[in-house]
Amino acid sequence: MITFIKKIISGQKKLYLGILAVLSLLSSFEFISVVMYSTSNIEVDFANGYILQLVTGIVIMIAFALTLFVNNYIINNKNEEFSLLLLCGRNMKQIIRYILIQFGLLFLISYALGFLIGWGWVYMYSAIYDAVITVDLTNILIIYGALFLTKMIYVVVIDMGKFMRIKTDIAGYMNHVPRKTTNFNPFKLMSSGLALKGEKPKTIDMLPKGKILSTILGILLIYIGFTPMLRSIENNNLPTYFAFSLLGEVLIIDNTFPLLFDLLHNKVLLKSKNWIISLSNLKDLTDVMTAMINISAVVVPIIISFLFLQSVSIDVQNAMMMSFFALMASMFLCFIIRFMIYLPTRASVIATMRALGYNKKSIFKIHYQEMMLFIILIVIFPIVMYGSLLYQSYLVNMITYNTFITMIAIYIILYTFMSIYMIVSYRKLIKEVYDDVRYLNHGE
């Protein structure tokens, strides 16, 4: 078993080093959030202390969930490896031991490195804000260790579920008995159709009524909730307005691209084949990244809202900015990982486009259109909404100028790097597929 794991790791060193780096950074963000959650030297009243612990608690849970997403991304690419273990006759006890050795050791090392990197974040925070962090190390280690144990339980359960699904698929394949086939006569089927019975064939209504209603509702909710907040940030009904605005934002983000494709693909977009391919690709991309997109659309505004729903002290604002950075950096890493796994699946699509006669410049243009629409709706739209609310909070002295600029800069810098990475990666893949003869058969 150990020899098999060594061969797997040695054959995929770059992959495992990359995963270790990502898990270590996610663990360090968990650690800094645990430190902020447990700190005792920030003198605040009950309301401010509650907000600080709520924000850091949310960030800890999100970093925890994102780590499990990374684990899911890993095991989704290990079908051959898991199948080989099962075909070799390994029992459940040996499989659990395999999971604990490979994934348990990986997570243990990442948590140890995360502890060290996390202390680096603490020192950086102390240096930037000239603050002294006083914490109970035993309490931090207990919380941090509990997160590790809980995570390992989830990892074992998730990975065992993957093994069981593969085992079921193998058993079904081995026990498969081909059905007797009958000669199929399409002309006979046509002659005995509805037309001979005098019945009219049913027409399918292709109008996406549900998506249209959801999008209209999202626009109305944003108008009802966002407009009063933009007029005055010191409104008594601010939490209600914010809830309406947040729900409207999520509805628009989830429904806009599928709605545009469903409405326009059979009429308007047929006149512009580049746009129909761009929207089709974009629909696939948003389907794959639905979880990450929704976390970004919901959690980031909630963290920002704590700064304008109630006035908080400067010390709490500084601590929240560190937690906000941890949250944004965690989502940035998971966006990149998910896109890295998604990107190779587009090679066959690009090869097909080449076989249909698209030149390299046209393919570049199609993917630029796809990425620009993605960036506008997923990245720019939320920050324009909630950045304007942060600016309103700054104008009425609810937050400091440093808090306003830092949070906007963190969001813009990280998502700019993500956008550049996605565009450059697409460009690199297009060049590889277009110039490599290995992909010709895929397109044909």
Image: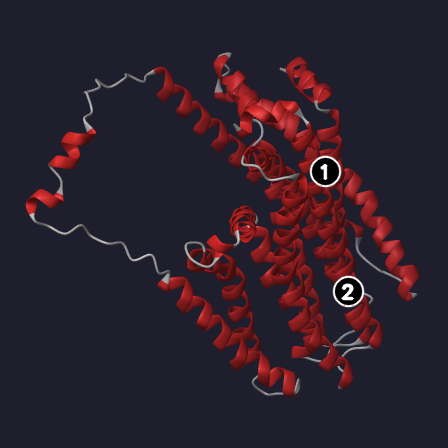
- Count of numbered circles on the image: 2
- In the foreground, 272 or 197: 272
Residue 240 visible in this rendered orientation of the protein = no
For label 1, the crowd category at 10 Å Cα-Cα, with few meaning under 14, some 14 to 19 and many 20 or more, is few
Location of residue 170 in the rendering, given as x and y in whole percent from the top left corner: 41, 20
Q: Is residue 47 above or below residue 20?
A: below
Q: Which residue lies furthest to the left in this view?
A: 197
Q: What element carries label 2?
A: helix
The quadrant of the image that shows the N terminus is top right
Say which residue appears at 82% left-offset and 77% top-offset: 400
Residue 166 visible in this rendered orientation of the protein = yes
Applied colour scheme: secondary structure
- In the foreground, 382 or 305: 382
Q: Quadrant of residue 56?
A: bottom right
Say which residue appears at 20% left-offset and 24% top-offset: 184
Work out whether mark 2 precedes mark 1 in sequence or the reverse, and give the earlier one: 2
Residue topped by disc 2: 321
Location of residue 150 in the rendering, given as x and y in whole percent from the top left corner: 60, 43
The label on residue 428 is 1
Instruction: Tell me if 199 is positioned left or right of 146 in this view.
Output: left
- In the foreground, 413 or 118: 413
Instruction: Tell me if 180 is positioned left or right of 344 in this view.
Output: left
Instruction: Tell me if 360 is positioned left or right of 86 in this view.
Output: right
Q: Is residue 204 above or below residue 288?
A: below
Q: Is residue 105 above or below residue 408?
A: above
Q: Looking at numbered disc 1 in the image, what kind of residue is underneath it?
A: Lys
Q: Looking at numbered disc 2 in the image, what kind of residue is underneath it?
A: Met
Location of residue 182 in the rendering, given as x and y in whole percent from the top left corner: 19, 20
Instruction: Tell me if 123 is positioned left or right of 430 in this view.
Output: right
Say which residue appears at 63% left-offset and 47% top-offset: 367
Q: Alpha-carbon distance for marks 2 and 1?
A: 35 Å
